[in-house]
Amino acid sequence: MNRRTTLHHGASGADHVHISNGGGGRQLPRVALLGTGKMGSTIASRLAAAGFDLTVWNRTRQRAEDLGIGRVADSPAAAVRAPDVIISSLTGPDAVRAAYRGPWGAVEGLRGQLLIEMSTAGPDVLAELAAAVGPRGRLVDAPILGSPAVVQSGQATILVGGEAADRANAASVLRHLGEVRQVGPLGSAARLKLIANSMLGDVILAAAELQVAGERAGLDRDDVFWVLQRVAPGLDRRRADIVEDRHVPTLFALRDLAKDLNLALALYRQFGADVPLTAFARSLIVAAAAESGALEITSVGRRYRSAARDVPVDREPRVPREAVAAGV
């Protein structure tokens, strides 16, 4: 089965991307990638290996040059002019706004392409972006569940929200990164990603706390971790971090998890959701990020190891001051 990319005119007169299977020579859509950080560079590597023609842009140009993949553009506007599909993988809401709506932003160069916004930036910035893009593009949100290593292996899960036809077109590109799950209208995927990262924060914090608690109770550290990963199987890849207190290399920085939890709590407050556990986890993670934000998210456990060294064995458990401040 071959793939071809065509542009067709919508009622507004703007061009829209349609990616379909058909006869003739194999033609993959041209892709622009905005953002070549850890995740963006991994996306670029996967798509280049699959045969996509890439144009890349990064705020720090040298990082894009260092990839050695595709053409490097001077600005987002320049990056998006020729490609059929625009993918963005940026650090947060402000970076998304700057890349699309700032000086020489991508919006200036749009001509009806499909925009796949993959950053963990929350749903509010998507609404802003949709309004700015208007008829000049077709927007979907498509955050990734998984680390860059998982994406590199093709085993990631990508959540996709937007109009049905746009989700289908996006899936034909995103399937090269892993499993695609279409989840509803624009913004649905962004909300689900915040649910996922809230769960991740809760689980990592609980695992760090209970690992130290079990060791403090006289249990073998490997037995404690074995039990924890039986209950939460995703922990198995983090043994060295949790058991041996090693938190490098950084795949998901603590400061980025803190950012995501701030976005998540804002979302939950907006809809009146009661989330005392996640609010508590967020308060501890934000406090830890202020001290070691560049380290892996598991470094949140250092507060427990430090406390375990200082607290007498027979002392009553204390309520951390962060919990008091959070109203827990």
Image (spheres, rainbow, N blue to C red):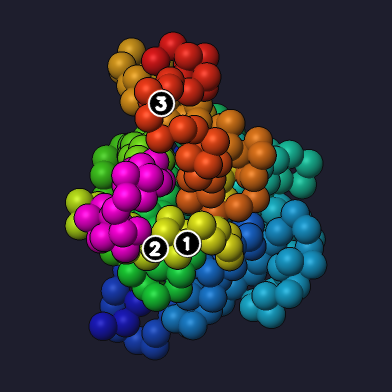
Magenta highlight on residue 221:
yes
Three-letter residue code for mark 3 = Arg
Give the image location of residue 192, x and y in percent: 33, 39
Residue numbers of the magenta segment: 207-228
Q: Which marked residue is nearer to the observer: mark 3 or mark 1?
A: 3
**Residue 82, image quadrant:** bottom right
Are there few (<14), some (14-19), or many (20+) residues within 10 Å of tag 2?
A: some
Secondary structure beneath disc 2? helix
Q: Which marked residue is nearer to the observer: mark 3 or mark 2?
A: 3
Which residue occupies 48% across, 23% down?
320
Verify CB contact (< 8 Å) between mark 1 and mark 2.
yes
**Residue 237 is at least partly visible in this image:** yes
Q: Which marked residue is nearer to the observer: mark 1 or mark 2?
A: 1
Report the disc number at residue 239. 2
Are there few (<14), some (14-19), or many (20+) residues within 10 Å of tag 1?
A: few
Report the disc number at residue 315. 3
* Distance CA(mark 3)–CA(mark 2): 29 Å
N-terminal label among 3 and 2: 2
N-terminal label among 3 and 1: 1
Give the image location of residue 314, x and y in percent: 38, 30
Report the disc number at residue 126. none
Three-letter residue code for mark 1 = Glu
Three-letter residue code for mark 2 = Arg
Magenta highlight on residue 323:
no
Which residue occupies 37% across, 23% down?
316
Number of marks: 3
* Distance CA(mark 1)–CA(mark 2): 7 Å
Give the image location of residue 179, x and y in percent: 28, 64
Secondary structure beneath disc 1? helix
**Main SS of the magenta segment?**
helix
Nearest to the observer: residue 115 or residue 112: 115
- The residue that label 1 is drawn on is 244
